[in-house]
Image: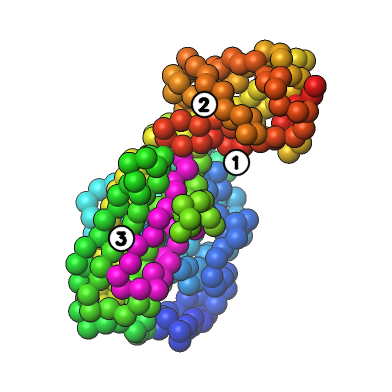
Amino acid sequence: MCFAQATYTNPRYGISFAYPKAYDIKEGDLGGGDWELGYLGSIPMEFVAPGGVRVVTVKIPKDAYPGTDLGIAFVTVSLNEYLTQEECEQFPDDVSGIGKPVTKKIGGIVFHGIVQGEGGMSHEFAATYYHGFTRGRCYELGEGVATSGYGSVDGMNKVDETKLFAILDKIVGGVTLRGKGHAVAASPSIGSFAVTHVAETSPTGNYRVSWDVKGAAADQVWLSVSCSGDLNILEITDAGEEGPSFPCDVNQVTKAATGSLDLAFRNMSGGEAKTTVRLFAAGSPSVSRTFAISLPPLPVIISISGGGERYVHGMPDKPFRMAAGQIFQIIGVGLLPKEILWIGPMSIPVESDGQKINFISPTSLPGAEYPLFLANERGKSDVLKIELIK
């Protein structure tokens, strides 16, 4: 099948390639819908550090192969200006690679690739992703095919994936890259990079990130922190209090080649969490340093019950009614044997079996609304609003 050709050109990133004019094309983020892999989720980017930008994606129209199990067949082009050349050649540890790594020369640049494959519940995905480094930028070219329904839907035929990949591979092989990355220092170096507890008396989730970069301007140094799930990061103010949120998986310019930043890592997952703090200095060549830390869980209040009342985590944000002098039970995760229960200004030592805490609500406080939370050597829990009834 022969299609008239169109040319995509992106002057900003120096990317151009030819593709069949009848194919669908979309710049930037994909936004889901017909641009997803179905049950297997979104079309991925496979960089090892934050900073990836999806530039453009081309897909073969599904109606070009009616009656088959084709979900989507695509070529996607992304780039990352916050990777060293060595990092560019790598792929995340959780990428489901199959077979040996591959190399391919595209537009005069050697690309290192990995073949992927995964499936489940009659859905399958096969892809090859390539990374190439030039002019301070890491370019990613991905080609993939997702299918679903063959063998479970009557009358459905298997699409010829070999022919599809031949079409996609022709598009990828015709990509040319002539872009120029951001302004960089001649040859920066990282003199020191450390992640340490703010002070011995601080909660174990409070860390000071400090760095010293030589040969780079303040606007050429970036800091990023990886996080997922129920891990929140807050900046600690000069007064030692929790301040604004620090964004996850985003490169933040440090505004100083030498400096420090105090961060509070609030691990509310109920189990140990791992995160990495990364420093990157753009240069020729660029340099980076990564520091991995393990975070113990903070206490998390799942529910409180007693006196005919019950609160469950995630309920509408209204005060939990607590009658004074009655027995209440907290169910939680991440609890230590000894906790401190705070109700407003009052601290109550309590004991836990790891999951449950029983306590008597105070009678010495006036009837009013108060914040309630647990605290231990690791830090404090989520805060619940309660209404003490006298």
Instruction: Estimate how packed mark 1 is, as few (under 14), some (14 to 19) or many (20 or more) residues with alpha carbons within 10 Å.
Output: few
Q: Is residue 247 magenta?
A: yes
Residue at image x 70%, y 34%?
A: 370
Image location (x, y in percent) of residue 330 = 60, 21
Label disc, if present, on residue 210 of the rendered structure: 3
- The mark nearer the N terminus, 2 or 1, is 1
Total numbered badges shown on the rendered structure? 3
Label 1: which secondary element: loop
CA gap between label 3 and label 1 equals 62 Å
Residue at image x 40%, y 46%?
A: 206
Which residue in the rendered view is the most extreme toward the right? 390
Q: Is residue 167 visible?
A: no
Closer to the eye: label 2 or 1: 2
Q: Which residue is mark 1?
A: 155
Residue 278 versus residue 338 in the image, above or below = below
Residue 374: name its quadrant: top right
Image location (x, y in percent) of residue 259 = 33, 67
Label 2: which secondary element: strand
Residue 346: name its quadrant: top right
Residue at image x 74%, y 23%?
A: 322
- Lateral position of residue 116 relative to residue 238, left or right: left
Residue 106: name its quadrant: bottom left
Q: Which residue is mark 2?
A: 340
Instruction: Estimate how packed mark 3 is, as few (under 14), some (14 to 19) or many (20 or more) residues with alpha carbons within 10 Å.
Output: some
CA gap between label 2 and label 1 equals 64 Å
Are dots 2 and 3 in contact, CB under 8 Å? Answer: no
Amino acid at circle 2: Ile
Closer to the eye: label 2 or 3: 2
